[in-house]
Amino acid sequence: MAGHFQSLAVTFLGCGNLSSAVLDGILSSLYDSSEHFNASTQTSKVVSSVSEPILVPGNLVACVHSQGSATSLEKIYNGKDVTVLAQENVRGVKQADLVMLGVEPSVFREVLAEPGMRDALSSKILVSFVGGVTIHMLREAIYGHDASSKSESDAQKECQIIRVTPSTAAAVRGSFTLVIEEKDHPYPPQLLTKINSLFSRIGSVRNIPDSLAHVGATLASSGPAFFALALEGTVNGAVELGMDRAAALEMAAASMRGAADLVAEGESPDEVRRKIATPGGSTAVGLDLLEEAGVKWSMQQAILKTATRLGGPGLKKVEG
């Protein structure tokens, strides 16, 4: 049974494409009444079951680096419950219960080392979207190199840090969000419950060990770009045959969604293909062409190369 609802003030440090997608998805979820949004039904194959409380994001704040960016976001979120701040990161963090860090890897130290940031983060939750940056690196950026001299009371005031990888599909509440587990930094169950409750609003949630984070991020975050390329080629073929592009996009997207839904319900990709393509039929002709062109092998290599670029050690290139 779902628990009670608890308000949670959320601040976004950096509001690029990924953070904006998460913010958009959260806003969308808030338009659903609590009777229609049930986090416990949104969390198949998740980190942990959602118990008490179910978190309701509120007091949403987006912190950006320039007034120009702030003006653009203010137009986008006009009439919605989002406060936009320019060059006021510490002020935004002070207002939050939970902070989402979505800046570029090159500037995370600069942002977390701002004067007053350490105190502003005291006893709060810091969710990092910054790829390849460990909890140790984040903690060092906030608290410095020497943690041994901290008193017990100071340690208790430190923020809880958790690494999360959502995707831009969060904007339509279709993200497969990964919670990155580091061997030396286990997450308290209560923290996982909160993160699960929050991110289940924008899709599914699953925990994954740090050793596979680069693979998971490639599938969950980069994958939509790869599939979009295939979708674009499909649409171009239909347009070349005389179909209106908007209609072709609608049909092709529905077709891709249908294939994905069948696989999500337990059918293998091979089963989906065999059920559609009869030997010698029109679909088989198209599939033969795709096989000859090496489409499947190319997708496989795209996963391998992207994951390797993200820092995955020891990946073996698959020959084909």
Image (spheres, rainbow, N blue to C red):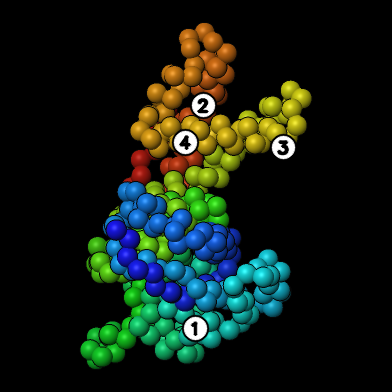
**Which residue type carries mark 4?**
Ala
The answer to whether mark 2 and mark 3 are in CB contact below 8 A is no
Sequence-wise, the earlier of marks 4 and 2 is: 4
Considering the numbered disc 4 on the image, is that residue within a helix, a strand or a loop?
Answer: helix
For residue 294, which numbered disc appears in the image? 2
For residue 95, which numbered disc appears in the image? 1
Sequence-wise, the earlier of marks 1 and 4 is: 1
Label 3, on which residue?
Answer: 246
Q: CA distance from mark 2 to mark 3?
A: 28 Å
Sequence-wise, the earlier of marks 2 and 3 is: 3
Label 4, on which residue?
Answer: 260
Q: CA distance from mark 4 to mark 2?
A: 21 Å
Q: Residue at x 40, y 37 (%)?
A: 264
> In the rendering, at what x and y percent does residue 182 appear?
29, 63
Residue 241: quadrant of the picture: top right
Q: CA distance from mark 1 to mark 4?
A: 40 Å
Sequence-wise, the earlier of marks 3 and 4 is: 3
